Image (spheres, rainbow, N blue to C red):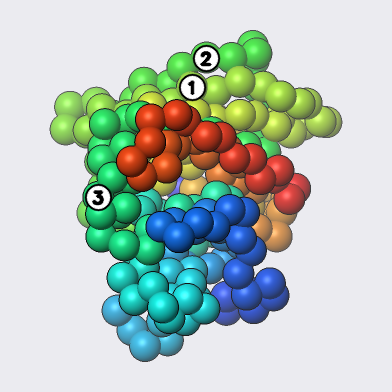
Amino acid sequence: MPPLPPTFDYRPPTEPWITTVIETERLILCDKPSGLLTVPGKDISLADCLEARVQAAYPWHPLTKVVHRLDKDTSGLLLLAFDKAALGDLGQQFEQRKIEKYYVARVWGELAGDSGEIDLPLITDWENKPRQRVDRELGKPSKTLWEVVGRERGITRVKLTPLTGRTHQLRVHMLALGHPILGDTFYAEGAARAAADRLQLHAEMLGFAFPGETEIRRFVSPAPF
């Protein structure tokens, strides 16, 4: 396992400030860039985040909150609610696993086969927090579906569908298969870590029902890598 990244050097991207995919009176779906926090950190230097940017851009929606989160280095679709009732409705869809979603990643090495399921329980690696690790006895159930969508020389592009929502789930599951995600400063080493200047993981599709509705609407943001 590589050493933990050095002191947290937060340099969030400034352009574009916000990328909006869809906006209604009750919610906004954004495309979060890699390197931007979803919510603010405890230190004042970590105040810039997607939630704060949307709150500043929509001051007439003072109750704006993120419905779910993406890691700082993961890019892609992120949903925010403009009112408490919408937040509850959308949050419940996540809790009841009614949300549809998948990610795209580029991983080191050539995966054997075309698809599969990873069923490995995860737990916080307390000595190396915020890292997570596989623990078959104490870990929480964690499942991921994977499907190859492209092959390069020594690199595989995969579609990843998390069936559970554990911290760093996709990153640890791919590492456990022996195929770390390119550019992953927490879990990749050597050539796999140096192969990309950012984490090659993107939340590409999100499907959900608008508050008060039942029909699932699906939105796609193609991976920028």
Taking the spot 42% from the left edge, 42% from the top edge, the residue there is 210
User: Whole-percent x and y of residue 31?
Assistant: 60, 56
Residue 217, horizontal then vertical, whole percent: 52, 34
Pointer 2 residue: 116
> Where is residue 173 shown, x and y percent of the image?
45, 32
Judge from the rendering whether residue 50 lies leftward or rightward of residue 94; answer left or right.
Answer: right
- Marks 1 and 2 sit apart, C-alpha to C-alpha, by 6 Å
Mark 3, residue position: 88
Would residue 203 appear left or right of 148 to someone viewing this image? Answer: left
- Of the numbered discs 1 and 2, the one sitting upstream in the chain is 2
Q: Amino acid at mark 1?
A: Leu
Residue drawn at x 57%, y 75% as measured from the top left: 12
Q: Give the SS element for disc 3.
A: helix
Q: Residue furthest bottom?
A: 44
Q: Which of the two discs, 1 and 3, labels the residue nearer the N terminus?
A: 3
Q: Residues within 10 Å of mark 1 (few under 14, many from 20)?
A: some
Q: Are marks 1 and 3 in contact (CB under 8 Å)?
A: no
Whether residue 167 is situated above or below residue 185 in the rendered picture: above
Q: Residue at x 17, y 27 (%)?
A: 137
Find out whether the residues at labels 1 and 2 contact each other: C-beta distance under 8 Å.
yes
| Classed neighbour count for the residue bearing mark 3: other residues with Cα under 10 Å, few (<14), some (14–19), many (≥20) | some
Q: Nearer the viewer, residue 207 or 145?
A: 207
